[in-house]
């Protein structure tokens, strides 16, 4: 997937902090917001190609990203506005579909999942564009707000006095061929939000997807919000995870299973993983695969089997973020074999997970011991009442 990050703003409202820095290079705990956005994209979409549209103090932005693979800076020839910047990108690049996002918004989105939702709706309904929205309680006057009907956006207002509304996360997916046609009526310099969106929405072209409560974004465009982000950063962008053992939890345990002929999903596995994905949890597989250490299976065979599982679940609309496993023999006394917590610890650090509200699913005493060590909720799977028991746990944890 191609991405375009708009990073041409001057940051007038945070000038006292930014000084001569472009707004996307203002640091949050030592890391510029632009770099955090790039890292988040690459965390979930490793093959991504990222374009950055810049103007104000563009040399600083070019210098900041020069050593990052597959990141290309497009310096605007003059101040083009947000719409003009997108049009300039389309004229200078040769892309088909692309994701558009802002360079001054902190996010914790699962871009692999967003990309999947875009492709799914595009293939099923033939849509040409999509915006990702979030239900926002309280005052929404600092955000663009949307009204929707029958799968399409029917109205957009830029920063109006509204409360408890659907607001823009600033993340869009577009088909570039269609967007180029729509841009023909606009001159070189124009606003994407104020000039283009109202025109585009009237054509009933903009589809939408409402994100979960754990898909968080934080605009740092004002001093107040910047300070709030700095004070609450690590909590703002945390999200819970559902960790699943593999054998006899998601699939039938055939004994040291790496043969695709024996691949068989347990009755409620699709439903349970989809339930947590729809709630906004990241989904991981964490398993012991000692068949490698026992010389029964090769590591490549286990990886192929796990990749098949991930593709199969994605075919059912379920994005599994990552699958990790311990390959060692039980006698090796390694640091990763469950019930030791290394595999889970690494995932928590890598994805900034909310450990307290995460859940571990498994069928063995080792799985339960690991959950206890991490002070996580544990749910045993592998019997007739898996779905009922899982729903009961969610109600207990106040997830509706």
Image (cartoon, rainbow, N blue to C red):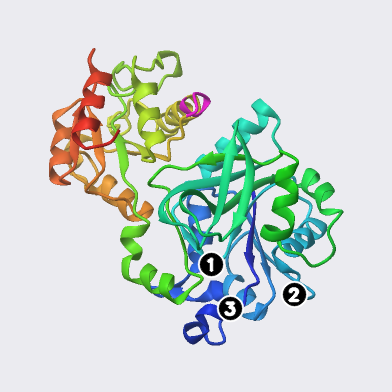
What residue is shown at x 47% (from left), y 31% (from top)? 307
What residue is shown at x 34% (from left), y 49% (from top)? 239
Q: Nearer the viewer, residue 379 or 365?
A: 379
Which residues lie in the magenta part?
A: 313-317
What is the secondary structure assignment of the residue under circle 3? loop
Check the image and report above or below for 319 versus 382: below
* The image quarter in which residue 339 lies: top left
Check the image and report above or below for 341 versus 107: above
Q: In the displayed structure, does residue 86 sit left or right of residue 119?
A: right
Dot 3 or dot 1, earlier in sequence: 3
What residue is shown at x 24% (from left), y 32% (from top)? 394
Numbered circle sitting on residue 104? 1
Q: Is residue 324 magenta?
A: no
Q: Main secondary structure of the magenta part?
A: helix
Q: Which residue is mark 2?
A: 79
- Is residue 10 in sight in this rendering? yes
Q: Which residue is mark 3?
A: 22
């Amino acid at each position: 997937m191609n991405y375009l990050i708009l990073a041409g703003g001057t940051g007038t409202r945070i000038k006292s902090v930014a000084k001569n820095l472009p707004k996307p290079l203002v640091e949050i705990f030592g890391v510029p917001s632009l770099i955090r956005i790039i890292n988040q994209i690459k965390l979930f979409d490793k093959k991504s190609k990222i374009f950055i549209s810049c103007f104000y103090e563009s040399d600083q932005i070019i210098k900041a990203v020069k050593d990052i693979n597959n990141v290309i800076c497009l310096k605007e020839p003059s101040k083009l506005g947000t719409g003009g910047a997108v049009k300039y990108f389309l004229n200078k690049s040769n892309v088909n579909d692309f994701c558009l996002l802002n360079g001054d918004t902190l996010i914790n989105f699962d871009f692999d999942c967003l990309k999947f939702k875009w492709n799914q709706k595009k293939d099923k309904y033939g849509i040409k564009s999509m915006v990702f929205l979030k239900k926002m309680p309280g005052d929404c006057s600092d955000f663009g707000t949307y009204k929707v009907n029958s799968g399409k956006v029917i109205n957009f207002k830029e920063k109006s006095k509204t409360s408890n509304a659907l607001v823009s996360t600033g993340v869009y997916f577009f088909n570039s061929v269609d967007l180029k046609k729509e841009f023909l009526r606009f001159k070189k310099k124009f606003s994407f939000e104020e000039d283009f969106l109202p025109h585009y929405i009237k054509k009933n072209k903009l589809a939408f997807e409402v994100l979960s409560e754990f898909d968080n974004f934080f605009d740092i465009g004002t001093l107040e919000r910047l300070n709030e982000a700095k004070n609450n950063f690590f909590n703002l962008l945390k999200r819970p995870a559902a960790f699943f053992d593999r054998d006899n939890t998601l699939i039938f345990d055939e004994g040291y299973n790496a043969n695709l002929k024996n691949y068989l999903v347990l009755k409620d596995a699709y439903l349970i993983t989809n339930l947590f994905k729809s709630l906004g949890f990241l989904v991981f597989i964490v398993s012991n695969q000692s068949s490698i250490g026992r010389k029964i299976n090769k590591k490549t065979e286990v990886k192929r089997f796990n990749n098949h599982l991930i593709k199969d679940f994605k075919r059912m609309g379920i994005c599994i973020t990552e699958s990790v496993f311990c390959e060692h023999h039980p006698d090796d006394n390694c640091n990763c074999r469950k019930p030791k917590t290394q595999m889970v610890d690494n995932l928590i650090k890598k994805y900034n997970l909310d450990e307290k509200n995460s859940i571990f699913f498994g069928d063995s005493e080792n799985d339960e011991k690991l959950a206890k060590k991490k002070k996580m909720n544990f749910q045993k799977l592998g019997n007739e009442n898996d779905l009922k028991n899982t729903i009961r746990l969610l109600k207990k944890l106040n997830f509706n």
